[in-house]
Image (cartoon, coloured by chain):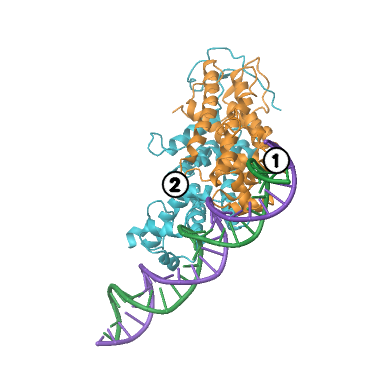
Chain colours: A orange, B cyan, C purple, D green
DNA sequence: GCCGGGCTTGACCGGTCGGTCGGTGAAAAC
DNA sequence: GTTTTCACCGACCGACCGGTCAAGCCCGGC
């Protein structure tokens, strides 16, 4: 080796990858997303790229490495992608921005996203997912920090922070199972709707707007015989 | 064999099946859930059951049929299981019961649940999932009916019904990815927490309780400069 | 006795898997 | 002009895949 590259391979900045490598990663991500890890063979990837199977092993040491570059690399970027899109503002505005940014990432890197959130997520034989979980944890902890911020600021009530984070991430993580890119709403719009539902709640009635607050979407038809559950 | 067959470890409603078949379904479900469909070989299933691979083919015609009995059979029962647990009451109480019942089903038939919601969900080559989707659709439509009921009764505001259903189901469907059975909270309790968050919303401040309503958990420290988003 | 049929088996099939190997041809370095 | 480097390929390997099959085992009825 003539010179040591400044970037070790674990950091996986894919900007310096060759076109061929990018093509392999793109096709592999698409295949992993649609057929799963075990269901996608190296022959499938080679065929999709129009190259020989041997060439895959010229650029990658094995199948796991291809998957790692698709999935681990993408989840690494997810945190940075989202973090850089959180504007200054109130904590709840940040939470909304978090959700919308995550949705944007999903839209832009959809196959990698699906591959990283779907395939063989819980095979106990492999610790391959360990690293992925670490990166995911950083992402999730970031959200929890925003939630705690919002609680401290009094913007949201004192809810269970990890559970709230799970609810928010569930709404985003499950999206790829039903989202249809040909339909009208963009993932960002969907994230916005979910934020509205989670933040403001579904309930109407029982509560009344403060004088200064914005008008509700719809005046409640009925003064609510709604089940007023105890706070358990 | 008769008594044992009525209900076996995590296998839903295989009433007329023999013990051996139930054992195969239970082990196969566990394996499918942890390693995926493609990642689980017939040898794995046979080994886990302590029988020969040939015996699997005596009881089932092929691998797909085992999967179908595990996954499709379980999702078939999901709708009936939940429907029978919806009590009389207000629509929002029904929605809460829907969520808790679904969580109970998840807890009781966890492996089958995971297998049916995880494995090869979007392989376009197979229409095996078609039938599963139909059953899932009936389940989801049932929820949408409850939501529409709640809107008509004025209990919840006029939200987008399909989108609301997706939010609720996301919180439940994603649970298997982070739920730890050794931790304290049961799935039913988690579903209850999620219902509370979604129904009442996270927000504090801006709204004030009606005189008759229960006291809030925490008075808002600040009169909320919270982002009062337009309804867009 | 011995007979038939449901369980159960090990040996086996064609095919595909991830991965390896030796080599080719063209450009880059010397 | 020679050597080195490098993207690339087709043939091939042992292991494992889903699935088959003829044959044993077991056990109640004759």
Q: Position of residue D5 (x, y in %)?
A: 64, 40
Q: Chain of mark 1?
A: A
Instruction: Determine the CA span between mark 2 and mark 1.
Output: 44 Å
Residue A19's disc is 1
Determine the residue positioned at 43% across, 35% down: B189
| Count of marks placed on residues | 2
The part of the image, by quadrant, that contains residue A76 is top right
Q: Position of residue A178 (x, y in %)?
A: 62, 44
Looking at the image, residue B119 sits to the left or right of residue A89; the answer is left
Q: Give the vertical position of A69 relative to A91 (above or below).
A: below
Q: Give the vertical position of B175 relative to B12 (above or below).
A: above
Residue B88's disc is none
Q: Position of residue B35 (x, y in %)?
A: 47, 49
Looking at the image, residue B78 sits to the left or right of residue D3; the answer is left
Q: Residue furthest top?
A: B222
The residue wearing badge 2 is B110
For the question of whether residue A131 can be seen, the reply is: yes
* In the foreground, A160 or B85: A160
Callout 2 and callout 1 share a chain:
no
Looking at the image, residue A73 sits to the left or right of residue B179; the answer is right
Q: Nearer the viewer, mark 2 or mark 1?
A: 1
């Amino acid at each position: 080796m003539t010179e040591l590259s400044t970037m070790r391979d674990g950091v996986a900045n894919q900007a310096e990858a060759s076109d061929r490598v990018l093509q392999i990663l793109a096709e592999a991500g698409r295949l992993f997303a649609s057929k799963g890890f075990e269901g996608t063979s190296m022959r499938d990837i080679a065929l999709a790229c129009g190259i020989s199977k041997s060439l895959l092993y010229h650029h990658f040491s094995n199948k796991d490495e291809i998957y790692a570059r698709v999935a681990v690399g993408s989840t690494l970027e997810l945190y940075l992608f989202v973090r850089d899109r959180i504007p200054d503002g109130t904590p709840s505005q940040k939470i909304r921005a978090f959700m919308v940014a995550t949705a944007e990432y999903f839209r832009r890197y959809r196959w990698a996203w699906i591959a990283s959130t779907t395939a063989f997520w819980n095979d106990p034989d492999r610790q391959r997912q360990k690293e992925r979980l670490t990166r995911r944890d950083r992402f999730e902890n970031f959200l929890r920090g925003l939630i705690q911020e919002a609680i401290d600021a009094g913007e949201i009530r004192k809810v269970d922070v990890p559970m709230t984070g799970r609810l928010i991430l569930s709404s985003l993580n499950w999206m790829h199972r039903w989202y249809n890119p040909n339909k009208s709403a963009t993932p960002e719009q969907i994230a916005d709707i979910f934020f509205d539902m989670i933040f403001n709640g579904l309930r109407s009635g029982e509560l009344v707007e403060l004088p200064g607050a914005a008008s509700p979407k719809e005046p409640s038809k009925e003064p609510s015989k709604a089940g007023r559950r105890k706070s358990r």
